[in-house]
Image (cartoon, rainbow, N blue to C red):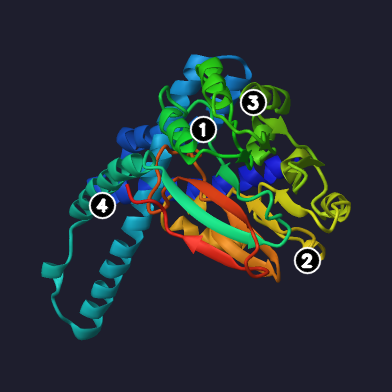
């Protein structure tokens, strides 16, 4: 409950402030008063509450209105965020010009936009970026990483992991959206398929077909998944049932041995009211035999200091690399292991995926979705790591 209160407080503080900013700009640009102003305020309030009301309708089994409201609310959310990011620099420019005019007693109105011109130009740019962002969200990139370790026996050879993360299958996951994901994963030919949480994000349209498509992916050494925060928001039982129908073994604070070479440890996301101290994670990792390659699956890219060098590779997601630029910069302040491959300690690395789907707004801007191919190879030299560029498409 405390996490919900914190989330709602941040939601209304940040997103509500963005709506207030738009409301003030619209009122000043179009001289809105009386009934017109009240009407715009009412519309903005409806749109502000749309994502929350969609969840409430979903919890009551009102699937169709929940889906419609989700699409309206989240497309509008994308517009608001991009608009504000574009409008603030324009307002800053006008403020500087106005200050210069007053200080120098000059007339620089020729290099300024009127309030209506400003809001119109920013709105057009916002819509253009949204169209591009919807296109980018469908352009799944294949990232490749090669990791050599003396814990991978020469007799075993290459073990190929394919990582998907943050698909957010739910009301915003329209029919056909899974097709390019399945195609990209199958083309990678994984030995192991890994999902690092947020596979599920609410009521799933055509869930049987999506689960069947995921189940059809060949992975000789198995498919493993963990919970993300959205599995708990959507309802853990339904999320876990779908995950298993999709062919994944759900690891909830447990470890499994694979191919006598890897030990895969999966931990629950703290959204499930589990411990955030990392004590249970530490206990699990300490039980891994030292000669085995330790793979840790953890939704959030956080590394507890006491667990450094307790694993060889941690796979995470959650951040989406901000999903819509420039929010990646803010994500980096909270999660320093924000995206890609990073060395945590000698012989200890973390890879954070940008995510394969989208949360909320069905767009991505300068943060394309990815699937990740990670080849675990026998050591040539201990600890050697090579990054390989994505395949060109």
- What is the quadrant of residue 103 in the picture? bottom left
Q: Position of residue 49 (x, y in %)?
A: 51, 33
CA separation in Å, label 2 and label 4:
45 Å
Q: Position of residue 172 (x, y in %)?
A: 47, 29
The residue tagged 3 is 247
Q: Residues within 10 Å of mark 1 (few under 14, many from 20)?
A: many
Residue located at (44% from left, 39% from top): 361
Closer to us: 202 or 262: 262
Closer to us: 283 or 182: 182
Q: Is residue 338 visible?
A: no
Q: Nearer the viewer, mark 1 or mark 2?
A: 2
Residue 135 higher or lower than 325, as above or below:
above
Q: Nearer the viewer, mark 2 or mark 4?
A: 2
The residue tagged 2 is 305
The residue tagged 4 is 122
Q: Secondary structure at mark 4?
A: helix
Q: Secondary structure at mark 3?
A: loop
Residue located at (52% from left, 60% from top): 330
Q: Nearer the viewer, mark 2 or mark 3?
A: 3
Residue 160 higher or lower than 242, as above or below:
below
Q: Residues within 10 Å of mark 2 (few under 14, many from 20)?
A: few
Q: Earlier in the sequence, mark 2 or mark 4?
A: 4
Q: Secondary structure at mark 1?
A: helix
Residue located at (72% from left, 33% from top): 250
Q: Secondary structure at mark 2?
A: helix
CA separation in Å, label 2 and label 3:
34 Å
- What is the quadrant of residue 248 in the picture? top right
Q: Earlier in the sequence, mark 3 or mark 4?
A: 4
């Amino acid at each position: 409950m405390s996490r919900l209160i914190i989330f709602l407080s941040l939601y209304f503080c940040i997103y509500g402030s963005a709506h207030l900013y738009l409301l003030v700009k619209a009122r000043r640009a179009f001289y809105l008063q009386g009934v017109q102003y009240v009407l715009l305020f009412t519309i903005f309030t409806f749109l502000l509450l749309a994502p929350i009301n969609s969840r409430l309708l979903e919890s009551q089994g009102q699937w169709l209105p929940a889906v419609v409201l989700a699409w309206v609310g989240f497309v509008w959310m994308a517009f608001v965020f991009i608009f504000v990011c574009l409008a603030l620099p324009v307002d800053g420019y006008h403020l500087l010009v106005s200050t210069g005019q007053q200080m120098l007693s000059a007339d620089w109105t020729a290099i300024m936009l009127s309030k209506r011109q400003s809001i119109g130009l920013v709105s057009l740019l916002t819509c253009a970026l949204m169209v591009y962002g919807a296109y980018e969200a469908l352009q799944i990139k294949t990232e490749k990483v090669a990791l050599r370790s003396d814990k991978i026996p020469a007799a075993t050879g290459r073990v190929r992991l394919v990582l998907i993360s943050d698909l957010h299958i739910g009301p915003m996951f329209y029919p056909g959206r899974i097709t390019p994901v399945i195609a990209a994963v199958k083309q990678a030919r994984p030995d192991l398929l890994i999902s690092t949480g947020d596979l599920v994000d609410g009521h799933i349209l055509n869930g049987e077909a999506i689960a069947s498509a995921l189940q059809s992916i060949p992975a000789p050494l198995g498919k493993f998944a963990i919970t993300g925060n959205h599995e708990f928001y959507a309802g853990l039982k339904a999320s876990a049932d779908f995950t298993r129908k999709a062919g994944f073994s759900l690891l909830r604070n447990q470890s499994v041995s694979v191919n006598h070479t890897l030990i895969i440890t999966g931990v629950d996301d703290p959204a499930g009211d589990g411990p955030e101290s990392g004590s249970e994670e530490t206990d699990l990792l300490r039980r891994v035999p030292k000669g085995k390659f330790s793979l840790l699956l953890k939704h959030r890219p956080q590394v507890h200091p006491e667990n450094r060098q307790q694993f060889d590779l941690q796979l995470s997601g959650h951040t989406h690399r901000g999903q819509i630029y420039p929010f990646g910069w803010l994500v980096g302040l909270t999660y320093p292991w924000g995206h890609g491959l990073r060395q945590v300690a000698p012989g200890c690395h973390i890879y954070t995926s940008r995510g394969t789907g989208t949360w909320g707004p069905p767009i991505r801007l300068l943060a394309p979705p990815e699937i990740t191919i990670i080849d675990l190879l026998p050591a040539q030299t201990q600890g050697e790591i090579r990054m390989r560029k994505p395949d060109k498409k």
